[in-house]
Amino acid sequence: MVQTILVAILASNALFTFITFLINRHDASKNNADKILRKLDILSSKIDHVDYKVERSEAISCRARLLSFNKELISKIRHTHEEYGQVLEDCDKYERFCKDHPDFKNNKASLSIENIKRCFAKCEEDGDFL
């Protein structure tokens, strides 16, 4: 009977040790998973920031091209239908970026965009492309 009690005590001690091991292992895995999730959140935030910077840079490039194009229109330089197509695509990209990012100021190109669209419509109507 003493042997049975001793075996029961040893078995329960072994079971307790094993359960403690599993709990500690689970906690360590959970901590690792939490660390990985935090790092993924940081990485995702950095990717979003880089994506915004790329889109912003593209919008600024579009704005520069359409301002230049408008200056040529004001200087009475004629353009081909394809050139208008490209600059109108730039206008769309620029306006979409401005709409999606209200913090980005769009007071630098609004009048140029209006003039480009007006000149394109007139060229379409008159068939007066280069």
Image: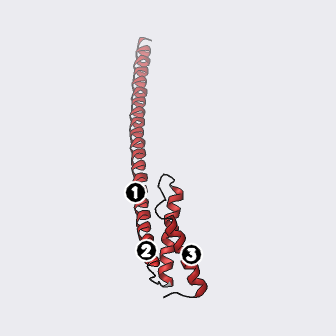
Q: Position of residue 96 (x, y in %)?
A: 53, 62
Left/right placement of residue 130 relative to residue 43 reads: right
Relative depth, front residue between 24 and 10? 24
Label 1: element kind = helix
Measured from the top left, where is residue 71 in percent x and y?
43, 74
Q: Secondary structure at mark 3?
A: helix
Mark 2 or mark 1, whichever is nearer to me: 2
Q: Nearer the viewer, residue 83 or 123?
A: 123
Label disc, if present, on residue 71 of the rendered structure: 2
Closer to the camera: disc 1 or disc 3?
Answer: 3
- Tag 1–tag 3 contact (CB < 8 Å): no
Neighbours of disc 3 within 10 Å: few (<14), some (14-19), many (20+): few
Amino acid carrying mark 1 in the image: Lys
Identify the residue under disc 3.
118
Residue flagged by tag 2: what amino acid is it?
Lys
The residue to which callout 1 is attached is 53
Determine the residue located farthest toward the right in the rendered image: 125
Q: Which residue sits at x=54%, y=88%?
A: 128
CB of mark 2 within 8 Å of CB of mark 1? no
Q: In the rendered view, would you say 76 is above or below 110?
A: below
Q: Earlier in the sequence, mark 2 or mark 1?
A: 1
Find residue 22 and report its image quarter.
top left
- Residue drawn at x 39%, y 50% is 46
Tell me residue 55's x, y (percent): 43, 60
Could you tell me which quadrant the N terminus lies in? Answer: top left
Image colouring? secondary structure
Q: CA distance from mark 2 to mark 3?
A: 14 Å
Q: CA distance from mark 1 to mark 3?
A: 31 Å
